[in-house]
Image (spheres, coloured by chain):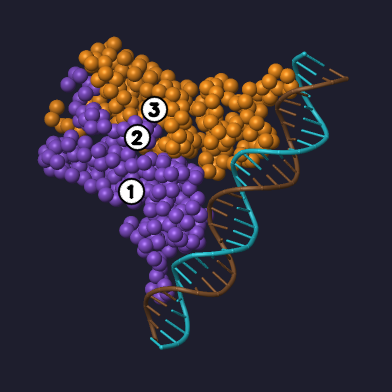
Chain colours: A purple, B orange, C brown, D cyan
DNA sequence: TCTATTCGCTACAGGTCGTAGCGTATCTGG
DNA sequence: CCAGATACGCTACGACCTGTAGCGAATAGA
């Protein structure tokens, strides 16, 4: 109902930009609100999280929330997106090691108790709100896809892979690889609720990299 | 808050059993309510679905809903549980064809708009409710895992695969394969919201079955 | 017929979202 | 140093939704 036309700001989560004249917004309030949102989300889930509760927990008036985020949806997405800020890609010398490292990092984030309820709640809302889904893609999914892209670039530089001739086909292949990696971890941790162990990671990378299913190779 | 101790009834969704004396409950009302729930879920999503709206749509009083289901959550779970009943495994002559068929079936179910909102909402609730997560595993996840199991058995019978010597390792491998297949489709359709096309399915099965990543084969 | 149960209807309490208005606090430009 | 502009906390509010209660009427078995 109240579309934000502004392109999303990565480092500064607040929405409506401050004018240069009056009292500036409190950055500490921003952080306190996001922290309180993550905590409440972990404890109560999407349905149990209320804006009033977040405001009290952050030591802030409820109206302050609505001055910065137009709705509960936007606030929760920003709070969840910050969970994935630390992800980085390594260059461990082999494609399998790199993949296993990315999977382990992703799994570590999803293992945090606040991540599971929060992510699923946000995904669920996104299924009926295309704008929210777009924001999920930009803030959560795309940064992770970059990791796969970089990992494959490393492997390419090491000569482990040969590049796809067609760039379109290459992009498609990266999409499928990313869907597979992200989806497997999400399914195991978010849907089934079982841990991603080193043993599972090894089996998964074997499945991806070795002709483990086809024995005729 | 109000746990139903009754073991879930598949064919008859109503909860509190009718006594043998008075006016019996209308079976048509049950069906109308479930249908209306699925339709409303498709149009409005979990958050937009209201019990009052479902009642009007079903031509039923709101109190009638609460006489049969203790809460909105239970009603939606029942309404969506039947979506996965039709899944079956084929024997199309090759492992790749079988996998592609399973993926296509799974994608077809997840393509229905009511499935996306409902499934994600139920998953989200399951992340904080171990009992609900257990029901999800039994009613949704495990039946799908059987498909992978059967497909691999077919491939084994055709000689495309050699069995794992250790049965424990074999079970682990099946788990990983299932996590990978289910997760990839779920991620693409539920999280990102992009369609699973035949082209994507082909690329995915290639990734699983052929040494597509490692070019040194 | 008698009795138990369901049905639709209306009303209601409790809670939440998001907004409006007010006085006060804080920062910047002149 | 002062005036304008903005953020802040507070209270109140309308609209909506969940889930319950009570009422007459309808529908079945005994």
> Closest to the observer: A157 or B62?
B62
Q: Would residue A134 be found to the left or right of residue A195 on screen?
A: right
Judging from the image, what secondary structure is the residue with disc 3 in?
helix
**Counting residues from the N terminus, which is met first, the one under dot 1 or under dot 2?**
1
**What residue did someone put label 3 on?**
B104
Question: Could you say which quadrant of the image residue B67 lies in?
Answer: top right
**What residue did someone put label 1 on?**
A83
Q: Are there few (<14), some (14-19), or many (20+) residues within 10 Å of tag 3?
A: some
**What residue did someone put label 2 on?**
A189
Which subunit holds the residue at mark 3? B
Q: CA distance from mark 3 to mark 1?
A: 33 Å
Coordinates of residue C28 in the picture (x, y in percent): 37, 77
Which subunit holds the residue at mark 1? A
Coordinates of residue B84 in the picture (x, y in percent): 47, 25
> Closest to the observer: B18 or B201?
B18
Q: Residue at x 41, y 53 (%)?
A: A36
Q: CA distance from mark 1 to mark 2?
A: 16 Å
């Amino acid at each position: 109902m109240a579309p934000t036309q502004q392109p999303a700001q990565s480092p500064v989560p607040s929405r409506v930009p401050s004018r240069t004249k009056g009292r500036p917004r409190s950055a500490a309030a921003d952080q306190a609100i996001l922290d309180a949102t993550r905590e409440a989300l972990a404890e109560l889930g999407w349905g149990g999280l209320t804006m009033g509760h977040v405001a009290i927990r952050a030591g802030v008036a409820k109206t302050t929330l609505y001055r910065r985020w137009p709705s509960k949806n936007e606030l929760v997405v920003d709070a969840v997106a910050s969970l994935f800020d630390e992800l980085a890609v390594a260059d461990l010398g082999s494609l399998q090691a790199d993949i296993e490292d990315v999977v382990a990092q992703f799994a570590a984030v999803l293992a945090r108790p606040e991540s599971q309820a929060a992510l699923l709640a946000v995904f669920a809302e996104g299924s009926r709100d295309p704008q929210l889904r777009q924001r999920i893609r930009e803030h959560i999914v795309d940064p992770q896809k970059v990791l796969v892209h970089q990992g494959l670039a490393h492997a390419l530089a090491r000569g482990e892979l040969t590049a796809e001739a067609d760039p379109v086909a290459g992009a498609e292949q990266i999409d499928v690889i990313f869907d597979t990696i992200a989806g497997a971890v999400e399914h195991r941790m978010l849907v089934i609720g079982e841990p991603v162990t080193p043993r599972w990671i090894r089996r998964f990378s074997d499945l991806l990299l070795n002709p483990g299913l086809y024995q005729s190779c």
